[in-house]
Amino acid sequence: MDKLKMHTPDLAEENYKKLAALFPNAVTETINKDGEVVRAIDADVLRQEISSEVVEGAQERYQFTWPDKKKSVMLTNQPIAKTLRLDREKSVGRDGTLGSIDTENIYIEGDNLDALKLLQETYFGKVRMIYIDPPYNTGNDFIYEDDFAQSTDGYLAGSGQFDEEGNRLVKNLDSNGRFHTDWLNMIYPRLRLAKELLSDDGVIFISIDDNEQENLKKCCDEVFGSNNYVNQFAWVSNITGRQIAGFGAAKTWESVLVYARNAVLTRSLTVDIQFAKNNMPDSYKGFNKDIRTDERGLFVVGDTLYNHNRKFNEETRPNLVFSIFYNPETEEITTGEIGEQKDGFVELLPHRNGDGVHKYHAWRWSRQKIANESYDLIVLPNSTGEYEIYTRIRDFNTTLLKDIITNISNGDSEVQRLFDNRKYFDYPKSVALLKLFINSVIDKEMIVMDFFSGSATTAHAVMQLNAEDGGTRKFIMVQLPEPCDEKSAAYKAGYKTICDIGEERLRRAGKKIKEDSSMDTDGLDVGFRVFRVDTTNMEDVYYRPADYDQGQMQLFADNIKSDRTPEDLLFQVMLDLGVLLSSDIEETEIAGKKVFSVAGGYLIACFDSDVTEETVTEIAKRKPFYAAFRDSGMANDSVMTNFEQIFETYSPKTQRKVL
């Protein structure tokens, strides 16, 4: 049996392993600050391997840095011994039933830095789109104050980054000498962790204003790579404008930066034409299509087939300069040499080139493509009575998204309507804005994440879009349970934290979406499992047994905290093994013991005490990929002795784990 590590990945250790695999000759040993011999990477050898030019010390180079940047990188890589604990009472089932967890959506209460670390193994490369609306650092908002003083052991102890009084947010006044530094130290590690969750074709959208737009872009250039920059949107959020600085022009727009995990694999961002015309009429006009039909369905006439660029001609693209032949009677389209004669066919010459040097423009399609896809071409007479060839556009309901977003304001009114016209949240983003971004990615089954969830507009937009187009998108929201001002209307109405507001909004929005939808919503998932970031389920001795002598060890008959339930243990094991938090969970009983079957038996776990051979045998017979037990859960030494043999007999390929 393998012992589960029960803490987040040590990213520094993972990076060490990658370097060691690439450059084994750079692996060495040295003495650390505690006088212990430890493994290390020889920087001199590594330099020799990677480049003949090495920049170091005070030597000038292009770079983006700030105080504590190195500590910010270390903060990203340090593991934490924390977990996510399910809150059933706050959770909602896919049909809106309170207390149910049959849903694929996730809402996490807690520090998003911790949450991002906890999700690293389970959701690595699985999130197609991230949208975040972080603090703008205006001098009036709050930022996360990360603790750079704690050691790795401090993180593993699970005390987190709260101070002695439990405070986590700090008002970053513009009089603070570390005004930009504190904001950068907050955003940088979160972006680094978020990148690892994105799929290869994933994208991240980030709302920001002028205070930190420049710094954010530099951060993103470094984290994602400047070659993966996609767009900077100008969202005209307030067309009337407002004067903040006391001089200059009135500000009407905010930025939304978009970066890809890998721009080469990322598709164009598109928008539904009808949505664009209805919601952004100032930016999207026209689009009055001549819709036609053929045996393959509806289409509109696209552009002519020739390449308008004069640089593509018989010299630069000789394979794309030829004649196209059209039969007016049969509408057959074929290709041939320029000047060739074909009975019953009209020759369509490539367009004349006007550069004064070359004779023809090239076609946009090759001979082979025309032969294979002539059904997507149409020949029509022009004004002179001759013929012109065009493409047939089948997907004509969408167009490229423009980098200016108009006619969409913030979501104040829509949130107030959900809460009986009461204002409980300032400046929420609108559902229309998030629908625009989510729909532009063109994936109806993706996971959408927002780790500055706020009022949960992103999750609302996901549910609304699924109701409109039948999609099965899932969301993961993360929000710090920031206390509401005791004088605020929200607090007086019973909403003690921002999470309370966001969760209640989703409950109300899900119900309203189902009531208002003209489509069948029986399969629509408007639920969400609520988790909260908490200290690890394990006693400290689990992580640092060397700190305890044998007498003390005997005090820990069980290495699990006394207030933790089997369900708590299950979700920490799922995180450790990379099993999705949204997986189906079935509870059964085997020989009087509670057994969890996760994801159709992929993981089977039993965390009861006094587990007998009967329970172990039945679990082995079900042949799970993973089987998990408590280290101290076996009924006696005989069961422990026979445990491995039972699995070798019935399911030798099952990976056995204990905690």
Image (cartoon, helix red, strand yellow):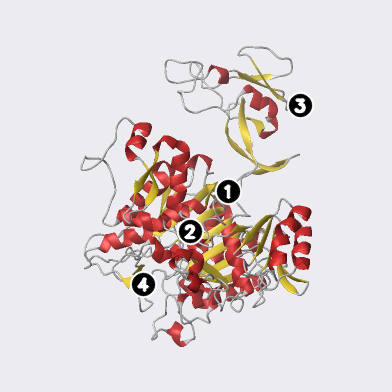
Q: Earlier in the sequence, mark 4 or mark 3?
A: 4
Contact (Cβ within 8 Å) of mark 4 with mark 3: no
Q: Which residue is mark 4?
A: 169
Q: Which residue is mark 1?
A: 398
Element under disc 3: loop
Say the numbered circle drawn on residue 129: none
The residue located at (52%, 65%) in the rendering is 477
Contact (Cβ within 8 Å) of mark 3 with mark 1: no
Seen in the picture, residue 650 relative to 523 is either above or below; the reply is above
> In this view of the protein, which residue sits in the foreground, 88 or 331?
88
Q: Find the distance from the CA under tag 2 to the CA under tag 3.
A: 52 Å
Residue 8 at x, y percent in the picture: 50, 59
Q: Nearer the viewer, mark 2 or mark 3?
A: 2
> In this view of the protein, which residue sits in the foreground, 334 or 385?
334
Residue 367 at x, y percent in the picture: 63, 22
* 389 horizontally vs 651: left or right: left
Q: Which residue is mark 3?
A: 330
Q: Earlier in the sequence, mark 1 or mark 2?
A: 2
Pointer 3: residues within 10 angstroms few (<14), some, or many (20+)? few
Q: Earlier in the sequence, mark 2 or mark 4?
A: 2
Contact (Cβ within 8 Å) of mark 2 with mark 4: no
Seen in the picture, residue 380 relative to 486 is either above or below; the reply is above
Q: Earlier in the sequence, mark 1 or mark 4?
A: 4
